[in-house]
Structure formats: C-alpha cells, structure tokens
Image (tube, rainbow, N blue to C red):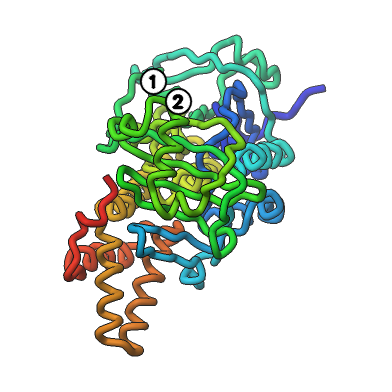
Amino acid sequence: MNIARKPYRVGIIGAGPAGTTLAALLAREGVDAVFFDDGRRPEMVVGESLIPRLVTVFRRLGIEEEVAKLGTYKPGVTWIFDENDALELSFTAMRGVLPTYAYNVPRKPFDELIHDTAVKAGARFIPCTVKLETDRTERGELVPRLSAETLALVPEWGGQQPDLLVDASGRRRLFAKLLGLTAKIGKRKDVSHFAHYDQVMMPKPAGQAIITRLKHGWCWRIPLQHALSIGVVVNKEHAKLYGSTAEEQLEAMIDQNKPLAEACPNRRRLTPVTTYTNYQLISDQGHGDGWVCVGDAFGFVDPMLSPGLCMAMTSAEQLADAITQNRPAGWDRAFHGYLDWFREQLKAWQELVDIFYGGQIFALQRTGTDMSRRFPGKISMIMQRHFEKNISGMAGGGLTTHPYSRNLLRFMTRYGIYGHEPEDFAVV
C-alpha cells in the first residue's frame, strides 16, 4: 500500500519529556513525527518536583488525570534557610495566574506516560542508536543529517532526509557536539547526589517540597507516593569534605544538618545513590538550515526552583507551535523567535535562582517579617500578599519573564533589605 505523505516530516533525536512532548503535539496536527532513542537512561532521573506551569502542559496533552494518579499533589515549597527560620510558599498565591498546585512524580513512569501519549497521538518511535553525519548546504553551512543506516529504519521516507531534524538529546547535546557549536557556561560547578528513602518523616503539609540550606550547598526533600527523594547539591570541592564516595557524602550531609537529621534519623535507603553534575549552559546557536534544538539540548539552568522539566516541556510546546503555524519557508524566522523566547526564559530563571543562592530573597523575607511586626495592619498585609503573588508566579513558571514581576523583585532585593545581610543567608 502507498502511504500518503503527511505535510511535514520531522525527525526527533531523543525520547525524554522534551522530545516526546514535541512528538505528541506535532502528530496531533498531522505532522509525520518520528522520534528515535537508544533507551540508555539511568534508573533514577532528577526533576521529580514539578511546578504549576507544567499543569497547563498536562492539560493540553490531556494527561493531568494520569499524572495525578502516579504523582503526589504538591501544594507548595518551603525553604529552610537556617535551623530556626523558613520561608513557606503556597501555590495558592498564584490564583488568577496559574493553577494553584503542582505534582511530584517518579520520573520513570512519568516519562513513560509522555512517551505513550506521543505514540497514541500518531508519532512513531524507532528504538535505535541514531547515527549522524554532517553535510554542507549550497551556502556552505555545516548541518546535521541522518545516516543512510538510520534513514533505512523509516522506510516510508524512501531514504530522504526529513524536512526538519530536532535535537532533543538533553545534555548530550548531539548536534552541538557534531557541529562544534559553542555555549555560555555558568559559574557554579556543583555535584548532586540523591536517592529514595522510607522510614522518614514526610513533609507537612502533605506533598510539600522542602529545600534546606546546608553548611555547604543545599538539599531537597521531595515526597513521592512510596518514598522520599532526598538529594544534596554541593560544590565539587566541598563534597570531598564529607567523604570519598557519593554514598558517604550524601549520608554525612544529611546527618550534619539539624532539620534534616531530625526528619529522618531512622531512614532506610531504597535505591542506589545517583550522581549528576550540575552547571548552567546556554548554547550560542540553536537552529540552522533544517535543524533546531529543544529542551536541555539548547540550554538549562540550576535545579534550584525546579525549572528543568518545565523548560523542557514548555520549549517543546513553543517549538511545536512554531513548526505547525508556519510553512517550512517561514521556519527560519519562526525559530529565531522561538529561541529568543527560550533565551529570555533561561536568563530570567537564572536571575531568579541567583537571588536564592545569593541570600537576597531570605534577607528580604526577614526584613518583611520585621516590618510586619513593627507596623501591623492591612497595608503591610496587602504589600506582603502582592509581593508573594509575584514571587510565587515567577517561581511557578507563570510570571518568570513578566517585566513588572522581575522589576519588582530587582527593586526590592536592591532597596528593600534593611538590617540583614544577604551574605548571611547565601548558599555556598
């Protein structure tokens, strides 16, 4: 039988959440979307704590009910910045901006859900190790191409290259390495160790994610249905002070922090300790003739505030719209707009993350508490709620790049701190 060619043929390299979200959205619009992956993924993946902006993506994909079944309802986040004080952020402050909740999810079944959603939408999955090669366009531009061996796995394409190749390979950044593309790399050079535990005290309110400032670095606690994910993020050199192995470093950092140690003195580790290196990176180039990047393959920021999975899936949304709402002749311009959006999102997230690392947000919180005690009343309460709504909206992914919210935060962290030094609350 002759299979009618669909309007566009798009090959997606990678089957993580960015690649599968893109495949699902394209297939629903009639695009011949094929995604490739070699299946080499660690048993445990970071990115278990989600933010409210992602709920809107789940609704667009029609999977929120399934996410709720496998995940844990998340009402907010608490930052413990010393043993006696904490900043509790409830997502209810986002009412009118975003959904007032999110989810914590075990990544393996979550990723499988997005994968299955793409296949059900009509995208085709080819399990293989993709082989790439380079070619030059008539203008002399170096571009990625699928090898003849890989093309043969999609016989419907008749050995022809797809109209568009998408790098969704995550931090492997296959196209960037193939083409020798440069990138801007952030200052922090941290390492992250995490594992799942039981026999621990679960955070309250139920589902609340907890971030704790440590003597060196910071720690997360993410409640899942059957376990508590505990992870530490620390400078590579500081990590050596806690032991010679990942297991020793993780356990020692838990034991040496009072809030953590009190929450899980009888903890039992259920999984091996998984290690990730953590840094910030934004590619200098994200698209060219016949190719474009999505998700971590283009750029990513620090895991503080959990922007990673959000940027992966929302960038897939943006790219899907750029592809389907324009003819191929207009893709170059559309992709420029898409990458401008992506860079601005990453820049805004990094700016927000930096004020947490620098201690400004905690010094500001202390200043606000002092002012409320000295000048109680409606005006103080209104000001506090207004600021909380904006900072919540930024951390939740809805107001991250909103000019008013960003300028309000810049103004307050520069001029609104009295009697407290940000350095005293910095994460080092």
Q: Is residue 251 depicted above or below 133 in this figure?
A: below
Residue in the picture at 46% in, 44% down: 308
The amino acid type found where label 2 is placed reads: Arg
Return the x and y of residue 421 as percentages of the image width and height. Answer: 18, 61
Q: Is residue 86 depicted above or below 219 in this figure?
A: below
Instruction: Return the residue at label 2.
Output: 172
Badge 2 crowding class, 10 Å Cα cut-off, few under 14, some 14 to 19, many 20 or more, is few
| Pair 2/1: label in front | 2
| Label total for image | 2
Residue in the picture at 56% in, 17% down: 130
CB under 8 Å between discs 2 and 1: yes
Q: Is residue 372 depicted above or below 26 in this figure?
A: below
- Residue at the outermost bottom position: 377
Disc 2 from disc 1: Cα separation: 8 Å
In this view, the residue in front, 150 or 386, is 386
Q: Can residue 10 be seen in this view?
A: no
Return the x and y of residue 29 as percentages of the image width and height. Answer: 64, 44
The amino acid type found where label 1 is placed reads: Lys
Residue in the picture at 70% in, 21% down: 156
Q: Which image quadrant for residue 30? A: top right
In this view, the residue in front, 283 or 162, is 283
Residue in the picture at 20% in, 68% down: 417
Q: Is residue 141 depicted above or below 347 in this figure?
A: above
Instruction: Return the residue at label 1.
Output: 177
- Residue at the outermost top position: 149
Q: Which image quadrant for residue 144? A: top left
Q: Is residue 111 visible?
A: yes
Pick the quarter of the image with the N terminus: top right
